[in-house]
Amino acid sequence: MRALRGCTATDNLAAAQPLAILETIPTRPVERTMTDTTDLSHYWMPFTHNRYFREHHAYRMLASAEGAYYTTTEGQRLFDGLSGLWCCGLGHRQPRVVKAIQQQADTLDYATAFQMGHEPVFRLAQRIAKLAPQGLDHVFFVNSGSEAVDTALKIALAYHRARGDASRTRLIGREKGYHGVGFGGISVGGMVANRKLYAPAMIPGVDHLPHTHNLKEMAFSRGQPGWGSHLADELERMVQLHDASTIAAVIVEPMQGSAGVVIPPVGYLQRLRDICTKHGILLIFDEVITGFGRMGAMFGAQAFDVTPDIITFAKGVNNGAVPMGGVIVRDDIHKAFMTGPEHMVEFFHGYTYSGHPLAVAAAHATLDVYAEQDTPARVRELAPVLEDAVHGLRSEANVIDIRNFGLAAAVELSAADKPGLRAVRIFEESLKRGLLVRFTGDIIVLAPPFIASTDEIWQMTETLKEAIKAAG
């Protein structure tokens, strides 16, 4: 992305970090080219067109990162238009986070979470519980969003069984939903490509609510669409079909990120909440993307003013620095497990790296910066800027929808001769111009870091406009 008018590269970086603490980030040399001996064939890349990548990896090999920017092995500077992968709202190499990890590695590098503890992880759970919606006050740590979802589903099923409702085994997800790649997550998820190869191994007894993505009624909405709250009533139909006594939980993303920033209609989430409460069904919010500031509140539940029974989180909890995720539950859910002999394990579940000391240290540092700089307020300040900037692309050729909420936006395009090809071309044209975006199908997704300046957000969309034109 071109440097802002009248700014040097250094000025541009400083403008990108209005929330960064006043510490000097040490510079480091950047490897400008890959070595000739690098063989790209051995690494099986996730969610990547591997064969295409090997032939078209120009500007795709990252060498370093600082603030709101990556630098490639060619020396190309890329504005990080997706905050890593929805992770790095505070930018890359955030000094407080880096220092915390370094110090922790030199003190306690690993601690088993089974039958042993370390004080910082208990304190982190306390901090997260205080940030969560009122009533959600127990935290179970995992290592990713996928693990968080599978953990939440297990908690939901085990909770009902512990209370004597063993018949409540049915789980309900939503079309276009993304809940990670564990078998539980893909079963309740609703993205066809993630499910079709694994149909024989899906969890039985799963239904899906209809998605809320309707271009005829919602195209070019700013914020929450006014149409669509009635789609939640499909849950009542499922209750009538299966009987509430068989349904354990409903899981939805407050905002569907991986499907291309699908915003919930006004009243939709509240309607789901009311139906779940009426029938004793647990409501799970998958906040792996929406948690920790992206929606303009610490959690999407608070941004949309709807409180679930269980929240999953990951990504932004520690600025993506070390893998970490978790599940937050109500006190009564936790208490349902705290029965039987005290010397016995109450919940037979966990991971080798649950509450890893380095991840915990990074999370404490991240939450410190969030608090000191009031990150949700910063997001609310930038959200209208992103909204105006991205909706300025409405008149561009092949743009059929634009949607946004908080610091998340999507530009949907008509398909080229091959579905998804237009978005790939726009992605590549953006890289050439110094901008990293994400594409899913024929949708371009934007989620700039919280430290971005107003000028950088406008320049991001101007660069995207150029890429759209160039891609044709």
Image: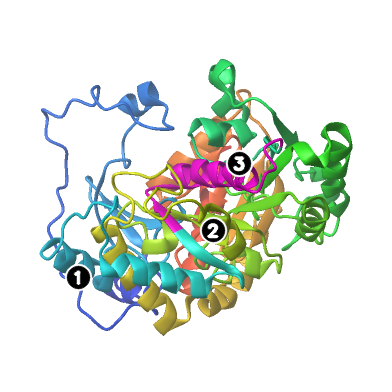
On-image quarter of the N terminus? bottom left
Visible residue check, residue 189: no
Residue 6 in percent (x, y) is at 37, 77
First-in-chain label (1 vs 2):
1
Closer mark to the observer between disc 1 and disc 2? 2
Q: Which amino acid does label 3 sit on?
A: Leu
Image coords of residue 361 (percent x, y): 27, 66
Which amino acid, mark 1? Lys
In primary-sequence order, the first of circles 3 and 2 is: 3
Crowd tier of the residue under label 2, counting other residues whose Cα lies within 10 Å: few below 14, some 14–19, many 20 or above:
some
Q: Residue at x 16, y 37 (%)?
A: 34
Q: Which of the numbered marks, if any, corresponds to residue 99?
A: 1
Majority secondary structure of magenta residues:
helix
Q: How crowded is mark 1: few (under 14 residues within 10 Å), some or many (20 or more)?
A: some
Q: Is mark 3 on a helix, strand or loop?
A: helix
Please give the range of residues in magenta. 140-167
**CA–CA distance between discs 1 and 2?**
34 Å
